Image: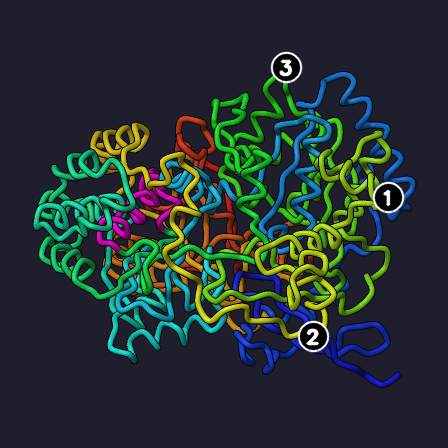
């Protein structure tokens, strides 16, 4: 049979770049960038192109697996697996109640429009609050800051890349990440275009990252972002640079904020940030004086001890300089489906609606901190988790102190994984159920509508049929729900469609959302409006507008007074806690940060031969002076030790990190039944992080993964055949 081409888009990271798949005999032969995609215009990163290898990987799980007593797996049938899961889950619910069930969603699940909705519907249907996700290792404090500022976690401003004159990037590396909480294909071009039209891109980062070395770099000490933001605000207020008119129109609590930042002049914070006071003062003036400026922070700014405070202050700088809801500033994305309005109306944009049993942490968008999941399993009493589902996730590698979680998994009465591989986590599951790849399912960028730098929509039909017996996650969840006698969806939606004689499906939900949205056809009442059938006639996607509108703040803010709230007691307490910290002492003189690698994505792309070619050894980046101080050379094996654990891996000496800072990529140190990933060696850097409730960020339950105090210890020189190892020595 001759080959043919199918149009789709990548769902590995947030740019959602267009792809063209060459298909023959029901198999993907090749992926290439889609030159007709109106945003990515023929660009895709190496990971997207390499997805062919994941699709066709011989290590991929394509049939249901049941774990044997010896830890191995045997193939089983769907009916046998689902019947046993249903029977055991029914018993657990009867004996322990709804709180005996937990579910962990991994990062890839966010790129499926149906998967997270059906998981949340399932957990709501059985009444369990124990929903966890990778968000508590990544982004949840950004959402909490939005709750404080705008009245909903879902209201997150994005930089107006196409119109800004000055972009301040804090703790992000978009030349490698391609944007995060910001959907902007070809973001490298967008940043260069800012400079080409006479603007500036300034990057605050402890490492001279790929983005920092390309534009203006302001080095900062790890976990110093809050001090920098406080000082920027201090200068703006002290020198009368604030936009008084914008503040009168948009905000409340301005005087409170001015008083809160008053003690933090750049001279007093210089020892905390490592940034000369004069540099901070000039940067504050530049932000205030620019015709249009935007401050944007991401992972590096979220993973310190005070990530919610940092996220809050990042937006506060935009507000105080008059750059919120302004062309070229920080703007609010608008989508053809008003997801934030819908979720707010049904109470799904929650914060603090429920609290974790361990640590009493508030939920963020219905999710509790994954860092306490192990203790929720091992701590007896009402609400102890006895059954755990893990879909598209590998928390043994992604949460702090993964060995604690790994040991806890052995105490469960039931564990089920829905995944592409037998990973470090699903290795412990009673059943591993095969999920489809994004090439085998239909999709829609529901989670990214308001994060897109340019209003844009694309629908993708499946490129190929599922391999083996793989099924979409939502279908698996429906099958499990059926066996325990429930329906995994919001009751109001089921009832509404039931009256029309219709069954709720993900595609029907999207069609309804499009048709009833601001650009929808209103079921024929608005000529030329959107519906799913029309969208499918444009496989490369549709640009809806050239720019997002501005002047929409009152429509976006959910506070009753329709103003941005700059006065929060929780923020005052965080500033007080920040000021009371005493440093990390002589036992741990260095600070650990993470970094992204172009050919990795968290923990799930290390089984791809194309991405693992060349020297992909896992290594710690160390400044030459710090390496000399402990007597290690390039390529030597060293030990990195924190108060929580220790790992061993190779040394890579480089001056891209400042003295006192070391950097280690995350997502390495695999086991499981994905052979190339396991053979790659490396170490799980999150063994250096603490899962103790007292060490988590209080407002969001976020793990402290950036700026961890550590020390470096020399080991024997590393031979070319020695692989990095990890240990959990305290």
In the image, is residue 328 part of the stretch drawn in magenta? no
Using residue 9 as the reference point, say whether residue 237 is left or right of it.
left
Extreme-bottom residue of the structure = 2
Residue range in magenta is: 301-322
Q: Percent from the top left, x then y, of residue 396?
A: 59, 42
Say whether residue 187 is visible.
Answer: yes
* Between discs 1 and 2, the one toward the N terminus: 2
Residue matched to label 2: 7
The CA span between labels 1 and 2 is 33 Å
The CA span between labels 3 and 1 is 40 Å
Residue matched to label 1: 501
* Residue 476, disc: none
Quarter holding the C terminus is top left
Q: Percent from the top left, x then y, of residue 540?
A: 64, 75
Say whether residue 689 is visible.
Answer: no
Q: Secondary structure at mark 1?
A: loop
Q: Percent from the top left, x then y, of residue 227?
A: 22, 44
Q: Are marks 1 and 2 in contact (CB under 8 Å)?
A: no
Q: 474 and 328: which one is in front? A: 328
Residue matched to label 3: 382
């Amino acid at each position: 049979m001759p080959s043919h081409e199918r149009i789709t888009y990548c769902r590995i990271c947030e740019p959602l770049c267009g792809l063209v798949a060459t298909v023959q005999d029901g198999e993907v032969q090749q992926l290439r960038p889609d030159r007709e995609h109106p945003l990515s215009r023929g660009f895709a990163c190496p990971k997207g192109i390499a997805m062919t290898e994941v699709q066709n990987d011989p290590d991929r799980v394509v049939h249901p697996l049941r774990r044997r007593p010896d830890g191995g797996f045997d193939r089983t049938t769907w009916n046998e697996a689902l019947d046993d899961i249903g029977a055991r889950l029914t018993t657990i619910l009867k004996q322990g109640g709804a709180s005996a069930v937990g579910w962990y969603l991994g990062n890839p699940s966010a790129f499926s429009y149906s998967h997270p909705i059906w998981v949340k519907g399932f957990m709501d249907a059985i009444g369990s609050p124990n929903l966890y996700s990778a968000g508590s290792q990544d982004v949840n404090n950004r959402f909490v800051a939005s709750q404080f500022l705008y009245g909903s976690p879902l209201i997150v401003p994005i930089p107006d890349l196409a119109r800004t004159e000055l972009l301040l990037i804090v703790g992000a590396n978009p030349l490698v990440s391609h944007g995060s909480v910001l959907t902007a294909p070809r973001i490298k071009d967008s940043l260069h275009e800012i400079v080409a039209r006479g603007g500036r891109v300034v990057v605050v980062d402890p490492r001279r990252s790929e983005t920092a070395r390309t534009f203006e770099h302001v080095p900062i000490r790890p976990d110093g972002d809050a001090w920098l933001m406080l000082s920027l605000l201090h200068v703006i207020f002290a020198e009368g640079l604030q936009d008084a008119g914008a503040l009168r129109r948009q905000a409340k609590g301005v005087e409170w904020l001015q008083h809160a930042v008053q003690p933090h002049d750049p001279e007093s914070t210089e020892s905390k940030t490592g940034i000369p006071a004069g540099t901070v003062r000039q940067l504050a003036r530049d932000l205030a004086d620019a015709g249009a400026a935007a401050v944007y922070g991401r992972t590096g700014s979220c993973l310190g001890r005070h990530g919610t405070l940092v996220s809050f202050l990042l937006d506060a700088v935009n507000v105080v300089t008059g750059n919120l809801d302004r062309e070229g500033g920080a703007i609010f994305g608008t989508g053809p489906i008003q997801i934030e309005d819908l979720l707010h109306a049904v109470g799904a944009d929650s914060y603090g609606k429920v609290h974790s049993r361990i640590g009493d942490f508030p939920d963020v968008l219905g999710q509790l901190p994954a860092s306490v999941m192990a203790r929720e399993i091992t701590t007896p009493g009402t609400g102890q988790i006895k059954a755990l589902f893990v879909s598209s996730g590998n928390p043994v590698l992604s949460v702090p102190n993964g060995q604690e979680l790994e040991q806890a998994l052995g105490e469960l009465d039931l564990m089920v994984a829905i995944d592409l591989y037998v990973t470090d986590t699903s290795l412990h599951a009673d059943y591993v159920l095969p999920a489809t790849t994004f090439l085998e399912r239909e999709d829609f960028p529901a989670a990214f509508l308001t994060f897109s730098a340019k209003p844009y929509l694309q629908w993708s039909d499946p490129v190929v049929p599922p391999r083996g017996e793989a099924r979409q996650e939502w279908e698996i969840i429906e099958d499990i729900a059926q066996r325990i006698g429930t329906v995994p969806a919001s009751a109001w939606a089921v009832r509404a469609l039931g009256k029309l004689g219709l069954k709720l499906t993900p595609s029907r939900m999207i069609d309804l959302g499009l048709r009833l949205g601001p650009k929808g056809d209103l079921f024929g009442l608005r000529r030329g409006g959107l519906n799913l059938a029309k969208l499918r006639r444009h496989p490369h996607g549709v640009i809806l507008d050239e720019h997002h509108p501005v002047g929409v703040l009152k429509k976006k803010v959910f506070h009753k007074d329709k103003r941005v709230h700059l006065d929060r007691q929780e923020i005052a307490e965080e500033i007080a806690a920040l000021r009371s910290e005493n440093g990390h002492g002589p036992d741990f003189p260095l600070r650990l940060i993470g970094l992204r690698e172009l050919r990795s994505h968290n923990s799930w792309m290390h089984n791809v031969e194309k991405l693992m070619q060349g020297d992909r050894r896992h290594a710690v980046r160390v400044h030459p002076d710090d390496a000399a101080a402990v007597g290690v050379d390039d390529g030597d094996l060293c030990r990195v030790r924190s108060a929580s654990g220790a790992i061993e891996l190779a040394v890579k000496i480089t001056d891209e990190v400042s003295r006192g800072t070391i950097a280690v990529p995350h997502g390495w140190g695999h086991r499981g039944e994905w052979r190339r990933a396991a053979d790659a060696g490396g170490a799980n850097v999150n063994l250096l992080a603490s899962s103790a409730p007292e060490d988590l960020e209080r407002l969001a339950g976020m793990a402290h993964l950036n700026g961890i105090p550590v020390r470096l210890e020399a080991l024997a020189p590393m031979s070319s055949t020695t692989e990095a190892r990890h240990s959990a020595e305290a």
